[in-house]
Image (spheres, grey):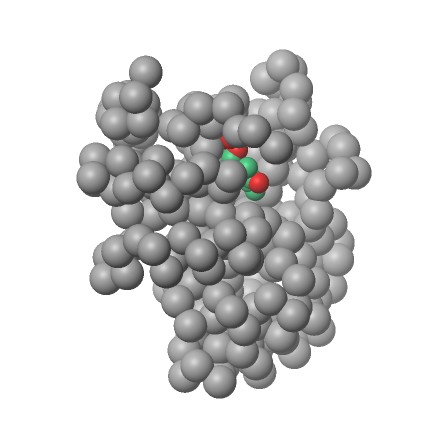
């Protein structure tokens, strides 16, 4: 199967209101170009260095780069000039640092709050309680160069579809809860980033607005 075929196949399965992030981490610029030529415009990367190199080589006018990995504060400045969405904000400190670099660039950077929804501790993210506490404290409202645009989560890596479904549902419920409590007047708070190659059909049923699909488009990654 080619990248183009894979993309078309996935696009056919997703409703209009769900956007596809093609996760191109560890894949070559040529592979990304093939996806681009097939019409894909949103790409996700999880390492700052790799993202910067690819950004330089590929068309800059209309590709939207999303950062989906664990972001170190000292790397923010390199991606701040061009990043379209950061999915993986997991501390207030990181949000504050993104705000600082965005300000230097004269930009407002959209960010998602990453929640730890999986039954594994290998994954990053706020707990629901930590996230509520951070929002209640209210200091994020002073950050004028970031825009909290929604939430992101990764389900447990398992064959147990009921578990995955319940984790996605918990994320959706949490989204609705904080939307009501903190973002009622904020029209930008709209995104629920959930679903990867093995679980995106479940995520879509549970209300995902952004799915992040890698291996199903580009093939298996070599680590
Ligand atoms: C790698 C990665 C993906 C894509 O994973 P696939 O299983 O290849 O679809 C999605 N989200 C995050 C945060 C990732 O790190």
Q: Residue at x 65, y 70 (%)?
A: 74
Residue 113 position in % (x across, y down): 58, 56
Q: Residue at x 75, y 54 (%)?
A: 129
Is 149 displayed left or right of 156 in the figure? Answer: left
Of all residues, the one furthest to the right in this rendering is: 121
The relative height of residue 163 versus residue 188 in the rendered view (above or below) is above
The answer to which image quadrant residue 6 occupies is top left
Q: Nearer the viewer, residue 81 or 174?
A: 81
Q: Residue at x 41, y 83 (%)?
A: 106
Is 148 displayed left or right of 4 in the figure? Answer: right
The relative height of residue 166 versus residue 194 in the rendered view (above or below) is above
The answer to which image quadrant residue 141 occupies is bottom right
Residue 153 visible? The answer is yes
Residue 108 position in % (x across, y down): 42, 75
Residue 173 visible? The answer is no
Tell how many labels.
0
The answer to which image quadrant residue 132 occupies is bottom right
Q: Nearer the viewer, residue 4 or 21?
A: 4
Residue 171 position in % (x across, y down): 59, 41
The relative height of residue 156 versus residue 106 in the rendered view (above or below) is above
> Where the N terminus falls, by quadrant?
top left
> Where the C terminus falls, by quadrant?
top right
Q: Residue at x 66, y 19 (%)?
A: 158
Residue 15 position in % (x across, y down): 29, 32
């Amino acid at each position: 199967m080619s990248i183009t075929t894979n993309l078309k196949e996935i696009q056919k399965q997703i409703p209009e209101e769900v956007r596809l992030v093609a996760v191109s981490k560890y894949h070559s610029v040529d592979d990304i170009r093939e996806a681009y030529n097939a019409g894909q415009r949103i790409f996700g990367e999880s390492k700052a260095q790799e993202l910067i190199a690819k950004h330089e080589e590929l068309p800059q006018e209309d590709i939207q780069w999303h950062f989906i990995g664990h972001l170190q504060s000292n790397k923010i400045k390199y991606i701040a000039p061009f990043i379209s969405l950061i999915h993986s904000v997991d501390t207030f400190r990181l949000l504050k640092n993104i705000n600082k670099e965005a300000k230097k660039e004269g930009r407002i950077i959209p960010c998602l709050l990453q929640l730890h929804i999986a039954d594994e501790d290998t994954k990053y993210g706020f707990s629901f309680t930590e996230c509520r506490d951070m929002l209640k404290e209210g200091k994020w409202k002073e950050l004028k160069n970031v825009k909290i645009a929604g939430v992101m989560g990764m389900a447990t890596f398992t064959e147990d579809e009921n578990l995955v479904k319940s984790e996605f549902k918990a994320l959706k419920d949490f989204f609705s809860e904080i939307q009501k409590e903190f973002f009622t007047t904020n029209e930008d708070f709209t995104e629920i980033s959930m679903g990867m190659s093995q679980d995106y059909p479940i995520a879509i049923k549970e209300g995902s607005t952004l799915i992040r699909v890698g291996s199903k488009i580009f093939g298996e990654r070599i680590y």
